[in-house]
Image (cartoon, rainbow, N blue to C red):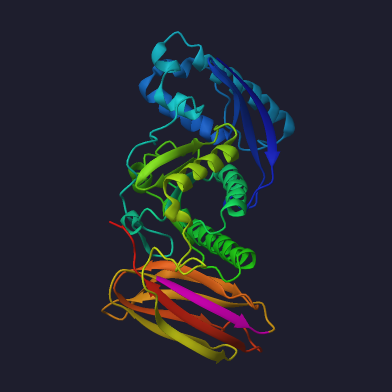
Amino acid sequence: MSVVIQSEIREGDELNNNQKYAIYTLTITLDGRDAYEISRRFSQFHELMDQLIKDHAAVKEIPFPPRKLLGNLAPKTVEKRATELQEWVNALLAHSEDGIKTAAPLLAFIEATEGMVKVGATGPSASFADIHGRVFDPATYGSDWLLIYSVASRDNSGALTKFMTAAGDAITAKYPSLKQIFVNVANLVPVPDKMKGVVTPIISKMHSSNTSKLMNSFTKNCPGAYNGQDMFFHADYSGEVIDSLGCSDSNWSYRVFIVAGGTIIKSFQSSTPNAVETYTAAIDEAVQQFPAVLAPWPAAEDGTSLYGETTKIAEEQIKIAPRKAHCVDVEITEPSLVGWQLKVLGNSSHLDFSISKKNADDSTVAVLPKRKVECGENPYCQVCHLMPGAYVLELDNKGSTLKSKEVEFAAIKTNIIDAA
């Protein structure tokens, strides 16, 4: 068992205040397993040391590189620190005290275990509010939907995004009509209270932007088809949701797992070999076992449908003036799948679109957060789950100061199948 560490200085992003930072890549060789790579930041090594010292005082005796307030990104400093960290990790793995080299935090840190998410186990049952205030409840979704959970910290979110982008492109090309819900949880436990007001708006903006891009990409690639994909994003500052998902080690490794038919069918982490290919194979397996995830909504081209009769609940053709918005009220009397079709014509780039549920006190809660629908001949078509209640769809042209929008809007509904 051995570890080799190399260093690299990377450009920062919004979550790193656009500041450069050092990353340390560990090449790990374990008995009976091919060598694999993971990336860590210095703060993560320091966190590991603090955790180990709580139960193993002998760890204090192993030299650990000191923190530096100035010059910590100087190339020679980073290279020297990589060498010292390599010596420190290997000393832990070779330590005479068995409790150190087999300590759970150490094994999780180097991803020598598969974590607590077990394939074959029942999928999570926890419901929680996302960053926009809407509630995600897995019991809402039947065997015609896949649930894709992902958990990452600031330090491994970049690697997760890279993996999920490549995997998502591969699946979209193969199964454009796949109905799936992405449940993204950010491990923000280390974030100080005073920084929450800074971090939350940043990740909310990033999530909204990413969702709009995916939505408009689907419209271009699958014209006229209803998009059965959606994203929930939860910012977890307490660790409660992370623990409920069995991902308390996500400060070290990102976690991704797929739930089909209420069962976890595949789990991934940063070091999973051939991750994109493995992810694609897992989706193939889910499609074979649960073909309803590919069933077109509301019906196939030949008219056959899993969802029963289709009912039109709204239809309008309107012109929305600059700096104005138009609202459409819809009443849902039973749990339903509701499809929204929206065509926006005009010379400007987009129209903002959102759906909210009305509460008894006239307040509202987001159902579909604001998204930017691009103008064009291809309508934006989205299907979502709605419980009984009053809903309002807002078509917002307030961002345009000069140009009106011609909008064609329609909504239909069907039954939900086999949800809890």
Left or right: 83 with respect to 420?
right
Q: Residue at x 47, y 32 (%)?
A: 47
Q: Is residue 398 depicted above or below 278 in this figure?
A: below
Dominant secondary structure of the residues highlighted in magenta in the image? strand
Looking at the image, is 271 positioned above or below residue 358? above
Instruction: Identify the residue at the far right of this view.
Output: 75
Q: Nearer the viewer, residue 178 or 327?
A: 178
Is residue 52 toward the left or the right of residue 240 in the image? right
* Percent coordinates x, y for residue 161 in the rendering: 58, 48
Q: Is residue 122 magenta?
A: no
Residue drawn at point x = 57 percent, y = 65 percent: 215
The extreme top residue here reads: 96
Quadrant assignment for the N terminus: top right
Q: Is residue 403 left or right of residue 52?
A: right
Q: Which residues are magenta?
A: 338-346
Q: Position of residue 255 (x, y in %)?
A: 47, 40
- On the question of residue 191 being in view, the answer is no
Residue 163's quadrant in the figure? top right
Up the image or down, 70 lies above or below 187; here it is: above
- In this view of the protein, which residue sits in the foreground, 307 or 154? 307
Which residue occupies 51% across, 65% down? 227
Q: Position of residue 318 (x, y in %)?
A: 54, 91
Query: 18 or 32, which is in the foreground?
Result: 32
Q: Which residue is drawn at the image coordinates 58% and 63% (left, top)? A: 209
